[in-house]
Amino acid sequence: MKKNNLMSGVLVLSIGGVLAKIFSAIYRIGLTRILGGEGIGLYQLVFPLYSLCVVLATAGLPMAISKVIARNREKEKSVVKKCFMFTSIISLTLTFILLIFARPLASIQGNVDITICYIILAPTIILVSSASVLRGYFQGKENFTPSAVSNIAEQFVKLAVGLILSFALLRVSLMASIIGAMISIVVSEIISVVIMLLYYKYNKPKQDTNIEANLSMKDIAKDVLPITATNIIMPIASFIDSLLVVNLLSVSFTRPMSIFLYGLESGAVSSLVSLPTIFSFAIASVILPNISLKGSIFSRSHKLSLAVKVILLIAIPCVLCFLFIPNRLIDLLYADRLNGYGVEGLNIAYRLLAISGIGVIFLAINQVFSSSLQAVDERGVTVRNLIIAVVVKFIIESIFMPSVKINIYALAYANTACYLTAMVLNLMEIREHFKIKINYYFSGKLIIANTVMLLSLLAILNLYRSYLTTLLALAVAVIIYFVALYFLKIFNKRDLASIKYKVKN
């Protein structure tokens, strides 16, 4: 029963995570259409620092607190109380720091107008940390529904309120529209906390049964801090990008144009690039939790192999679309909203998507490798490898971004190199814990299926150029792709048996 509950919980979190991320992706794409290149560039200047503060206040909290709750069922009430105290100290400190340094940071980033955005977002750090404590409490009790429901509600409210406010306030000014998007984040976090509090009200922890037990904040920190350290690297990298990229581009361009170019890559293009990983990692997450040192090397190697297969099935056709039809995808989603400053932003976005699209495979596979290494107690290795990859990224940006010819494309190349470096380094570690080999039979079938899909897609797109044709071509290509996978019998009997077992249990 316990194993069934665990797998059900993983499925609930996976489904909830997929829906939440779909809403988030729609929100970012819609917001880019409303704000345009410069507007989304200003928005993206603010968001990395806010995300970093949120990670500092909450990263690893649900997982760590759930571990503490699971180990201390007789002290649930004490755990929740101490966790609230722990997170309150951190979140309040970060909130005050953000409020105090909002203007200096905005000045460093090259636009003091975004100071108000930092001030609006600062209090939400407290809300997010509170919700994280409650999510950890429920996950520790193997009740995953509150987390899934609150995540979905949060992203849906941000989507609805954000796009409505941004569109309405665009008539006032571009900055007013950006402020509307920031307000939607505050509203969505309030809704998330309210939902979690309602669940908590009807599922409060019982009075501690072990009165003499003493759980200190130091005990909680021992679980929280290592996980926070693991999750903080990429948010720090994004924050540094928000300080570095615009200043490096300003060597060759005006600051407004530099912000515009940064918005193209970090807003318009990254929204598309992140879509494949939403689905691929959610599916793989159902397979990966069963990987551990307790199982045989052959058992965990098969689970890793199956996860990689699922990742490739989704990532490769997406990458082909990014490479061969970036113009049709960008036109479909953003139309002419990316042009500005005498620059054809659409053409720049086409090339950025083609470059960044290659990195999708590296990013998706590395997610699986990283999770697998953590499952066999190699978290320190993944942190080290990611730090090395981020250093490579910044070296490439620093050298090539000031160039007039390369400019913003250096960010796309740097991100791709970052994902590739992390994947290769993790692969070297993977080989010590897993038996892996290239499956030429599977690879051949995958090449055939993707070739058929791509040819059918290009054939339909060449018939007529319109948004409707693009949508129709994509829909037909998806159908043809899965039909090809079915007839090619892409999964072997052991894969199918494993998938059936996961779904059944």
Image (cartoon, grey):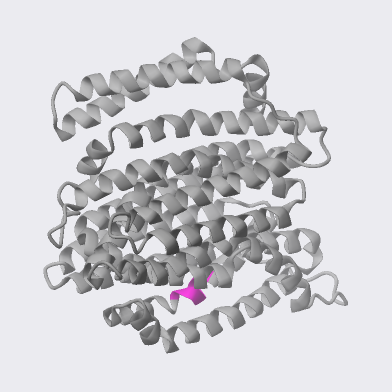
The secondary structure that most of the magenta stretch takes on is: helix
Q: Is residue 414 visible?
A: yes
Residue sitting at the far top: 487
Counting from the top left corner in percent of width and height, residue 223 is at 73, 66
Q: Quadrant of the C terminus?
A: top right
Q: Is residue 6 visible?
A: no
Seen in the image, is 442 located left or right of residue 260? right
The residue sitting at 30% across, 52% down in the picture is: 268
Foreground pick, 211 / 351: 351
- Magenta stretch holds residue 493: no
x 36%, y 25%: residue:
478
Q: Position of residue 13 (x, y in %)?
A: 56, 47
Q: Is residue 127 magenta?
A: yes
- Determine whether 454 is above or below 337 in the image: above
**Quadrant of res 443:** top right
Residue 59, quarter of picture: bottom right
| In this view, 202 is above or below 293 | below
**Figure disc tally:** 0
The location of residue 125, given as percent across then percent down, is 49, 74
Looking at the picture, does residue 17 appear above or below residue 231?
above
Q: Is residue 120 above or below residue 353?
A: below
Which residue is depicted at the point 16% across and 56% down? 343
Q: Which residues are magenta?
A: 124-128
Residue furthest right in the image = 212
Q: Quadrant of residue 474?
A: top left
Residue 260 locus on image (x, y percent): 25, 63
